[in-house]
């Protein structure tokens, strides 16, 4: 057993997820290595980064080459569900370790779960359950969905609808819009005339931000309807601007301004970022994941270069770090930690360039994520 | 029925962008005989310039409407002078390839510095709010976009088709050497025309900034739709591209209402249908 | 119309011999890759793209038609092959056939629509058609949208060759590539190729000689599309997935770039171009955001100063056709 | 089939947005003759050619070629029947050698044009015939020269050789001498004379001495209509022809 | 700057030019198309008010000479003086504005313009050109087809249009490249008359002709071009004496 580790941060470095993952994720991994203090104990830990450009084939090619040529032990981040699933197969084939933080698909810990994979931060199941449940309970009992017309959107809508009905709400309509639609006015008009109390946005990225902006333009908030963004990141809110985004409800598992520890970490992080950006939950997840991985290695007393073994060790240790607090990794690879319901502040309430969120509620991890009893993961059957 | 009116109107708004962009393409095509693949990137630049003007210089929307097209137009003229000009006499496809390269560079640089998720640009105060038209709530800004782009389109049409300049432009497309030998400074005219076409793209960019996010890739996918619009219209005339632009916006809008799954594809499907019936496009002259 | 390759060198028996020598050299070089320690997946990937670029080049370099939608054949064949392997559990050789057949059918349809317009219109129509297809695949259930088809079984070729072994896979891909390449070489130097050249040079004259030129261009289009499909089917085994990337228009752009860098209308140019661009993407991957900028710059530089491409310049220098 | 006339038109008309470029033309071309079509500029000669070769659709009238109605055919099909035209601007395949230019035409006739799986060496069987044709038009020493590099007059000759390769029964030549120097004119004229032994030729030409020397019969068109028809000597005496075409000064 | 200087020079107005004097002076003109060297040192003069004809075989370099004067050949050296102004380096639009007009052999009719637009396309550079009425008098065909698309005209009509449009501009020095090509004899006669009349009105004309019979009815002087050089020159009066030589030069 040697004490060398090579970490590959595979992310979208220039495309639409670059801001929420990208270089920030690499930085988060670096900080995790530094904070682990292993270097002082004689460990040699290197980090390389790669750009999968949101293309599964490029992602797998890089991953394969990392394992074959660069002798990488662990791949982290990997936003974009398509790439994430593709890389999942490679890591399993090469018996590496895979800590995904950026991808939403809950398949990673269900149908496609793998003994080499840990899924941190969030997934579609969690998003649907937390936001949906909270809003119905707060009186938003009739829903209209604007859904991106592809697998991710459909899953999100399906899961959320189930939650809404289960909690006594009603879904009164919905419209599927094509991915990357620049103009949502048609769809918004339909949502408006449906008179639903909540307009659920089962989409992501640019589609979500565009919908929110244009909804404001068409006076949708003023008519008493409320928008629920099922997936929204800090960087999205930044892009929309508080003026427009104010009052939005959504769920994240990390926000920089939660407590002293998160603030301290985020300050250090922001100083190293080009535009002073605060970490997103994806980047925070990378940090926490790498920390936990290194802890497991340390506990093993060296690097066995055996993915399954390391992940087993990781699952056997409870997780705990400054950013997500206490938690655990379930046998299917799902990390369990708290999820938080936020509301976007009014511009007048914001005190700084990244001061966006108000905490509305906390959902404990065991209620937020897929219960093991519902998981379709083959690992559980053994 | 009311919903239908609303969808028609909304379609018209999108049509404005198609019209402005395909108009710019038609102007450039008419003159330089190249398909300006960089059009989408320059459209994006227009929006970004407006954003910078506001955030760095405190210059408001109204000035941006004027200044951004000029700045991007000048940038376009520099491109023309330094690169496109060297392609005269070569196959038109090289123009397509060169501008494709330029588009990649411009988009890449902006992506590098501004990421992908987009920057906000607020609707100017004067155009905030909306009107209740009975059948729909029309944001004032959207109404403005339709009217303003109509005016710009018609003005451009007049300039190209009804003035001597237009005749020079068309003649110089066919045989620049000869037109120059008649005493017209063709290179300068070409440069200015490219600037005009690019300026139109930038203007569309400024118009769209408050509606959409200001994003480096905002033009990349749009431009392919506009290409389809151009193929449908046939690029035969300036008026043709304006009318097809608006018409397709409306058709697309209606599709979003009746069969939203197809709204991304409807323009392309229409293109296929038109080509099957009339291979030269609706107003096209034989290529 | 003006031709894209500004000087077409006459093909003499001597030139043919040069080309054969170059071909044998290339084949030997590629065959020795597994013994050199070069990462085989890289070479396999490049080979697939090289075949794609060669197919594309058949259309532009010899038919004068610039397709900006060739990714649609790559992607369609890829999806269909992947589906056949994964869902229908067909053996590899049949999977490849399914992919090729799909590309063939697609090229019949798209060719029929696009072939009647020339020049930039043709480019724009192919681009729009491929974008149409992109959106269809994005929504179609069998492609699994954004996620793509993952974890495709590689299986045993003809029941013997175990494709999950990198070296075996490498030689299968290499044989596929060489076969495709030779076919293209033959097409160019066939009676049909001669007519194609004549049409590119002066279409009205060809018509007046009694050639129904649309049919020849159509055949060239179908051949090119089908061969591109072959590349797409091979690529499935290398990448073990099929995804939207392969149908996106930026992929079509990359194919154009590869061919342009190597030399439009040259026989070996697309191969060299494909290797150059794939290598560049590999080694510049660390530059992240700047890769697009660099690619764009290569486009610009090629078009402005280096229109013949690498092989084109070499051929021009030695006054040979390569 | 041994008709006297190889090509006949009845009431052939072409209207462009209210303007009749060709009106009610009845043309009869005798098999084996050189038939000239002359007339002032804009008389409709080229339009007539375009109608006969189907590059334009007639607005009215009928075209009979070898007794067959070809009014509704496509250009390439008409060429396949043996009715072939040359262009007013020279039409060769510039980067193919003279030999290849001719071979392209031979190849069409003898099939195998779609064979993409065969080596082009199968085309070598056409080489002899191609050389013969080049010989006929005096281009033997240019066989391996790319067409771009040939002088203007030689290109016209090459074009004729290519056309002959199709073994046409009838050739339509539109101003074959336009832009040529005197030497070339004489050469081409002699060539046309020579080939007219085998083929029927319908040509448009403004060079009167050529017309006078070559043609068996002349049709004069003005304003889209047939003004007169006859031999050169007859026509020069016709006052109407003088006024409309030859001009006052003409002897 | 030079434009205005020229415009003020009195000798440049068509009316005054008839007084004679050297209008165009060409020395050691060489020209290239890309790599190929076409003109190898052309020398000749044109006096104001003259009609000068360049004769020569196909490919001798006549057209190239005209194009070099007009400034539309990529690479050219030597000296071309128009009104004592060196124009070898000037761009073609400047040259045109000094009062030189060119009618190319391939006619250059614009298909995207109608006949009227084609006719009025070249900008008027100074007063003194023909009016539209005068032009229609010369070429009645054009008047009938005014609204047709330019290239839909018959070959001969296009030739008329090409000549007609440069007569409008007020340029005093016309270069006509094979103006009779493809024209019916009647029209050729008409063009002969036109040239004679233009000469009378003070225009200077440089003509390139294959049709020697036509040239001999209008020209004052001849130059013979061969292989990119002027190999001979004589006046109309000396024509008879030079016929034999001409036969060998041109193969007439
Ligand atoms: N496509 C067209 N559209 C409109 N008018 C046309 C078209 N083609 C020809 N014309 C007109 O028809 C008339 C006859 O033209 P055509 O080219 O047949 O003349 P031509 O006899 O060949 O003359 P030339 O000897 O000058 O070549 C002309 O007046 C011309 O302007
Ligand atoms: N664009 C060109 N590129 C290369 N060579 C050319 C070009 N144009 C003309 N030439 C060559 O230049 C030489 C002179 O041509 P030019 O056109 O001046 O001849 P010309 O005397 O006008 O002949 P013609 O009577 O045929 O018009 C010819 O040998 C010709 O082949
Ligand atoms: Mg004619
Ligand atoms: Mg000439």
Image: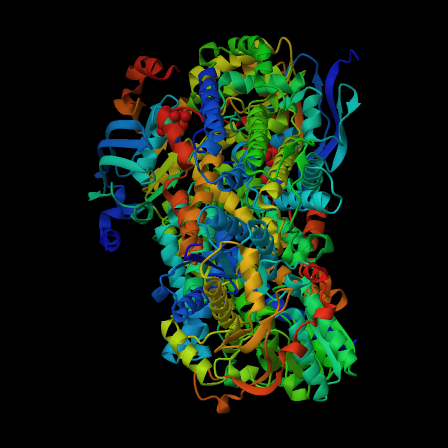
Tally of marks: 0
Residue at point 60% right, 14% down?
Answer: D122
Q: Is there any visible trace of residue A130 in the rendered image? A: yes
Query: Is C309 above or below relative to A212?
Result: above
Q: Quadrant of residue D120?
A: top right
Is the residue B267 above or below the residue A258 in the image? above
Residue C48 percent location from the top left of the image: 55, 39
The picture places residue E5, in percent across and down from the top left corner, at 22, 53
Quadrant in the picture for residue E74: top left
Horizontal side of A126 relative to A302 (left or right) equals right
Q: Nearer the viewer, residue E186 or E168?
A: E168
Q: Is residue E109 visible?
A: no
Q: Is residue B10 above or below residue E167?
A: below
Which of A146/C6 is in front?
A146
Q: In the picture shown, does residue A313 fall above or below E225? A: below
Q: Kindly identify the residue that appears in the image at 53 percent across and 25 percent down.
A: D206
Task: Work out whether residue E196 or residue A126 is closer to the camera in this orientation and state it.
Answer: A126
Residue C169's x, y, as percent?
58, 36
B276 horizontally vs C238: left or right: right
The C terminus of chain A: image quadrant: bottom right
From the image, which quarter does the N terminus of chain A lie in?
A: bottom left
Q: How is the image coloured?
A: rainbow
Q: Residue at x 36, y 78 (%)?
A: B57
Give x and y (percent) for residue B200.
49, 64
């Amino acid at each position: 057993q040697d004490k060398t580790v090579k970490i590959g941060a595979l992310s979208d470095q220039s495309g639409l997820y670059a801001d929420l993952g990208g270089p920030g994720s690499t930085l988060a991994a670096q900080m995790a290595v530094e904070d682990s203090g292993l270097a002082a104990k004689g460990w040699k830990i290197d980090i390389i980064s790669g750009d999968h450009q949101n293309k599964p084939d490029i992602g797998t090619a890089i991953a394969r080459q990392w394992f074959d040529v660069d002798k990488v032990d662990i791949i982290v981040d990997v936003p974009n569900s398509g790439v994430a699933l593709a890389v999942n197969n490679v890591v399993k084939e090469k018996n590496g370790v895979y800590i995904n933080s950026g991808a939403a698909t809950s398949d990673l810990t269900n149908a496609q779960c793998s003994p080499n994979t840990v899924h941190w931060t969030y997934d579609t199941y969690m998003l649907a359950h937390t936001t949906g449940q909270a809003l119905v309970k707060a009186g938003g009992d009739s829903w209209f969905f604007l859904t991106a017309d592809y697998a991710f959107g459909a899953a999100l809508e399906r899961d959320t609808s189930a939650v809404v009905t289960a909690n006594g709400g009603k879904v009164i309509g919905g419209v599927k819009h094509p991915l990357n639609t620049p103009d949502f006015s048609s769809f918004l008009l339909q949502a408006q005339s449906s008179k639903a109390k909540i307009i659920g946005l089962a989409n992501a990225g640019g589609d979500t931000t565009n919908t929110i902006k244009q909804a404001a333009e068409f006076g949708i908030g003023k008519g008493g309807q409320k928008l629920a963004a099922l997936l929204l990141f800090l960087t999205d809110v930044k892009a929309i601007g508080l003026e427009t985004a104010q009052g939005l409800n959504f769920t994240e598992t990390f926000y920089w301004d939660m407590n002293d520890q998160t603030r301290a970490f985020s300050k250090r992080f922001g100083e190293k970022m080009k535009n002073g950006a605060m970490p997103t939950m994806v980047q925070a997840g990378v940090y926490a994941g790498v920390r936990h991985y290194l802890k497991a290695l340390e506990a093993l007393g060296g690097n066995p270069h055996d993915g399954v073994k390391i992940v087993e060790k990781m699952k056997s240790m409870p997780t705990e770090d400054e950013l997500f607090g206490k938690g655990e990794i379930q046998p299917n690879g799902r990390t369990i930690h708290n999820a938080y319901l936020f509301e976007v502040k009014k511009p007048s309430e914001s005190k700084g360039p990244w001061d966006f969120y108000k905490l509305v509620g906390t959902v404990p991890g065991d209620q937020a994520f897929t219960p093991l009893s519902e998981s379709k993961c083959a690992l559980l059957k053994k | 029925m009311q919903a239908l009116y609303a969808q028609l109107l909304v379609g018209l708004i999108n049509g404005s962008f198609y019209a402005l962009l395909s108009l710019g393409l038609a102007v450039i095509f008419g003159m330089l005989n190249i398909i300006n693949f960089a059009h989408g990137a320059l459209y994006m630049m227009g929006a970004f310039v407006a954003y910078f003007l506001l955030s760095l210089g405190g210059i408001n929307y109204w000035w941006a409407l004027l200044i951004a097209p000029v700045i991007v137009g000048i940038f376009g003229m520099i491109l023309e002078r330094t690169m496109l000009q060297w392609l005269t006499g070569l196959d038109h496809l090289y123009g397509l390839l060169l501008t494709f390269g330029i588009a990649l560079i411009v988009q890449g640089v902006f992506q590098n510095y501004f990421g992908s998720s987009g920057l906000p640009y607020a609707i100017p105060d004067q155009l905030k709010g909306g009107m209740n038209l009975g059948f729909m709530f029309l944001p004032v800004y959207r109404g403005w976009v339709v009217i303003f782009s109509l005016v710009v389109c018609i003005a451009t049409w007049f300039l190209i088709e009804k003035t001597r300049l237009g005749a020079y432009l068309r003649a110089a497309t066919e045989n620049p050497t000869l037109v120059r030998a008649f005493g017209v400074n063709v290179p300068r005219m070409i440069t200015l025309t490219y600037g005009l076409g690019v300026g139109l793209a930038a203007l569309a960019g400024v118009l769209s900034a408050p509606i959409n996010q200001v994003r480096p890739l905002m033009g990349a996918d749009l431009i392919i739709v506009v290409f389809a619009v151009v193929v449908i219209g046939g690029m035969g005339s300036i008026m043709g591209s304006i009318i097809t632009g608006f018409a397709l916006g409306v058709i697309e809008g209606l599709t979003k209402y009746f069969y939203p799954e197809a709204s991304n594809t409807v323009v392309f499907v229409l293109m296929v249908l038109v080509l099957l019936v009339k291979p030269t496009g609706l107003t096209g002259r034989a290529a | 119309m003006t031709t894209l390759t500004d000087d077409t060198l006459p093909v003499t028996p001597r030139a043919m011999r040069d080309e054969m020598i170059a071909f044998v050299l290339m084949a030997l070089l590629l065959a020795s890759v597994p013994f050199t320690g070069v990462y085989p997946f890289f070479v396999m990937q490049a080979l697939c793209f090289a075949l794609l670029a060669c197919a594309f080049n058949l259309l532009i370099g010899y038919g004068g038609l610039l397709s900006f939608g060739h990714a649609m054949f790559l992607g369609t064949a890829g999806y269909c092959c992947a589906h056949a392997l994964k869902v229908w559990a067909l053996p590899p050789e049949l999977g490849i056939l399914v992919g090729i057949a799909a590309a063939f059918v697609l090229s019949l349809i798209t060719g029929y629509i696009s072939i009647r317009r020339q020049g930039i219109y043709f480019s724009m129509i192919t681009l729009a058609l491929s974008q149409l297809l992109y959106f269809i695949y994005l929504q179609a259930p069998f492609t699994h949208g954004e996620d793509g088809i993952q974890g495709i079984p590689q299986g045993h070729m003809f029941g013997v060759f175990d494709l999950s072994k990198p070296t075996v896979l490498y030689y299968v891909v290499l044989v596929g590539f060489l076969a495709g390449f030779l076919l293209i070489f033959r097409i160019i130097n066939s009676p049909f190729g001669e007519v194609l050249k004549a049409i590119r040079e002066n279409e009205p004259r060809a018509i007046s000689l009694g050639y129904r030129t649309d049919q020849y261009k159509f055949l060239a289009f179908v051949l090119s599309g089908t061969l591109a499909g072959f590349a797409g089917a091979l690529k499935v085994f290398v990448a073990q997935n099929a995804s939207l990337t392969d149908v996106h228009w930026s992929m079509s752009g990359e194919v154009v770039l590869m061919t342009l860098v190597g030399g439009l209308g040259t026989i070996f140019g697309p191969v060299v171009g494909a290797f150059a661009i794939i290598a560049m993407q590999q080694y510049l991957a660390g530059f992240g955001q700047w890769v697009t900028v660099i690619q764009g710059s290569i486009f610009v530089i090629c078009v402005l100063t280096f229109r013949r491409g690498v092989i084109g310049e070499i051929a021009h220098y030695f006054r040979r056709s390569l | 089939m041994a008709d006297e006339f190889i090509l006949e038109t009845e009431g052939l008309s072409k209207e462009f947005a209210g303007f009749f470029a060709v009106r009610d033309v009845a043309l009869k071309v005798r098999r084996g003759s050189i038939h000239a079509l002359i007339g002032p500029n804009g008389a409709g000669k080229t339009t007539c050619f375009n109608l006969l070769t189907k590059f334009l659709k007639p607005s009215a009238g009928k075209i009979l070629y070898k007794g067959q109605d070809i009014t509704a055919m496509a250009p390439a099909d008409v060429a396949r029947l043996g009715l072939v035209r040359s262009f007013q601007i020279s039409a060769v395949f510039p980067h193919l050698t003279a030999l290849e230019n001719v071979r392209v035409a031979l190849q069409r006739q003898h099939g195998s044009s779609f064979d993409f799986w065969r080596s082009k060496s199968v085309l070598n069987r056409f080489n002899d015939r191609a050389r013969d044709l080049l010989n006929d038009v005096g281009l033997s020493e240019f066989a391996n020269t790319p067409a771009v590099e040939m002088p203007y007059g030689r290109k016209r000759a090459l074009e004729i050789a290519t056309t002959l390769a199709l073994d046409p029964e009838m050739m339509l030549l539109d101003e074959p001498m336009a832009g040529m120097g005197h030497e070339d004119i004489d050469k081409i004229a002699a060539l046309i004379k020579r080939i007219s032994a085998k083929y029927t030729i319908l040509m448009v030409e403004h060079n009167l001495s050529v017309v006078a020397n070559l043609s068996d019969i002349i049709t004069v068109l003005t304003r889209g209509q047939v003004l007169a028809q006859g031999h050169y000597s007859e026509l020069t005496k016709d006052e109407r022809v003088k006024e409309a075409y030859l001009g006052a000064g003409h002897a | 700057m030079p434009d205005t200087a020229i415009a003020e020079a009195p000798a440049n107005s068509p009316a005054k030019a008839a007084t004679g004097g050297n209008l165009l002076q060409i020395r050691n003109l060489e020209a290239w198309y890309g790599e190929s060297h076409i003109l190898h040192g052309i020398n000749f003069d044109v006096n104001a008010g003259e009609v000068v004809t360049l004769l020569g075989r196909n490919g001798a370099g006549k057209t190239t000479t005209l194009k070099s004067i007009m400034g539309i050949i990529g690479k050219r050296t030597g000296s071309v003086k128009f009104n004592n102004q060196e124009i070898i380096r000037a761009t073609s639009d400047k040259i045109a504005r000094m009062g030189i007009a060119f009618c190319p052999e391939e006619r250059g009719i614009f298909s995207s313009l109608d006949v009227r637009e084609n006719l009025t396309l070249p900008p008027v550079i100074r007063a003194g050109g023909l009016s539209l009425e005068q032009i229609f008098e010369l070429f009645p065909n054009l008047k009938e087809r005014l609204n047709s698309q330019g290239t839909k005209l018959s070959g001969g009509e296009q030739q008329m249009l090409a000549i007609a449009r440069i007569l409008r501009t007020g340029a005093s020095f016309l270069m006509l490249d094979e103006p009779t090509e493809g024209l019916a004899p009647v029209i050729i006669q008409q063009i002969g008359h036109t040239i004679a009349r233009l000469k009378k009105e003070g225009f200077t004309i440089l003509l390139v002709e294959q049709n020697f019979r036509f040239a001999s009815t209008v020209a004052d002087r001849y130059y013979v071009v061969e292989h990119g050089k002027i190999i001979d020159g004589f006046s109309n009066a000396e024509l008879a004496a030079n016929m034999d030589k001409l036969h060998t030069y041109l193969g007439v």
